[in-house]
Amino acid sequence: MYSPRRYFYLPLIALILVGWFSISYAAAPTQNENYQDFTDWYLAKHNVAEVPWRAAAVIESGSFAPLYYYQEQTQMPAASLIKLVTAGTVLRYPIDWWQKIGFSWADNEGDFRQYLDPGDGFSKLKLNPLDKVSLEQAFGSMLVGSANNAANRMSTVTVDSREQFIQRMRQTAIDWDMINTTIEEPTGLSLNNLSTAQDIALGACHAFANFIIQYYSSKPQISFTTVNGEAKVIKHTVHRLRSDPKRWFGAKTGFLRETNYHIAAGFITPQGKKICVAVLSTADRVTSESIVYDLGEWVDAMYSW
């Protein structure tokens, strides 16, 4: 399986730094003469009376220029989109990616069952009690399959305590300009993990600019073998990314019964423009993914850069 260690060679680091430097000085998009707001464009295209999302934001990935806002300051539970902040915080530590870890009852249930009803299910990486995976495999499972136990375990693999890790997550959110985001725990299962569409789009731009996060969050699936020899295949929770990976440079889903479906995406438009997208609180997964494609079409028609 791919290892992030392969990227820790000086030539590649140099290329990455050049890429970051270029991003910092990217030209801002300009509206075309035929500009139409996405809300009106969407209503006309689909012949509907109202949009199917509660909040949305689109930001150009190079300049961080806002392209579209709709109730972008409306704060709501972020669900599993908070795992992008978890991932970004893990990468602030010196990590032994080959370290073998298992999952305790606290990782699988105890630390977050308080946020769920007794019969609620949730996504997790299923391991036999004595089995282990590498830290890298758990990290990938958190981003690709939204494994909650893997995200929870990430908060206890560093030199800091879980509480200190969560405090670092809050600092990561601040550093990513997510000023209206509050963080209680690393999985997103708590309703007290709150954010906005604007914050999520900004966070997606920062997260997907990281080559390790981008690698995993844009993979249709990952496969690996546990310490005890059990084969695992983890499929991406964004179904259209599985069938059309070239259009995505990162994606993360979120779902809670209280919010319905969220999506954060790094998306490449048909004309090759890179945008960071947050679409919050749609009725179903298919709709949330289709809106991302509509946004790509709209950006190509309405902006130049």
Image (tube, rainbow, N blue to C red):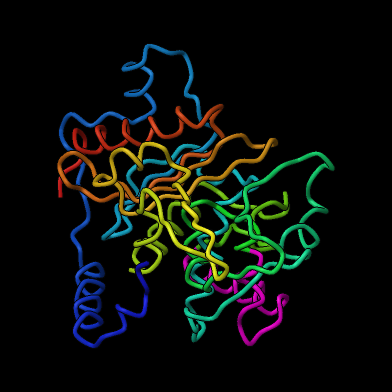
Residue drawn 55% across the image and 71% down it: 227
Q: Nearer the viewer, residue 6 or 185?
A: 6
Q: Nearer the viewer, residue 224 or 85?
A: 224
Residue stretch rendered in magenta on the structure: 152-177
Check the picture and name the quadrant holding the N terminus.
bottom left
Residue at (72, 54) in percent of width and height: 192
Establish if 286 lies above or below 74.
above
Instruction: Please name the predominant secondary structure of the magenta segment in the image.
Output: helix
The answer to which of 137 and 179 lies nearer the viewer is 137
Residue 36: give x, y in percent of width and height.
Answer: 27, 28
Number of marks present in the image shown? 0
Q: In the rendered view, does 197 fall on the left or right side of 108?
A: left
Percent position of residue 66, x then y? 35, 49
Q: Nearer the viewer, residue 246 or 206?
A: 246
Is 12 colored magenta in this rendering?
A: no
Vertical placement of residue 249 versus 183, above or below: above
| Farthest residue, direction front | 229
Q: Does the magenta portion include 176?
A: yes
Q: Is residue 172 above or below residue 208?
A: below
Q: Is residue 67 left or right of residue 122?
A: left
Q: Which residue sits at x=53%, y=31%?
A: 282
Quarter where residue 107 is shown: bottom right
In the picture, measured across the screen, residue 234 lies left or right of residue 3, that is right
Q: Would you identify the image quadrant in which residue 303 lies?
A: top left
Q: Residue at the location (35% across, 42% down)?
A: 241
**Vertical order, 184 against 75 (above or below):** below
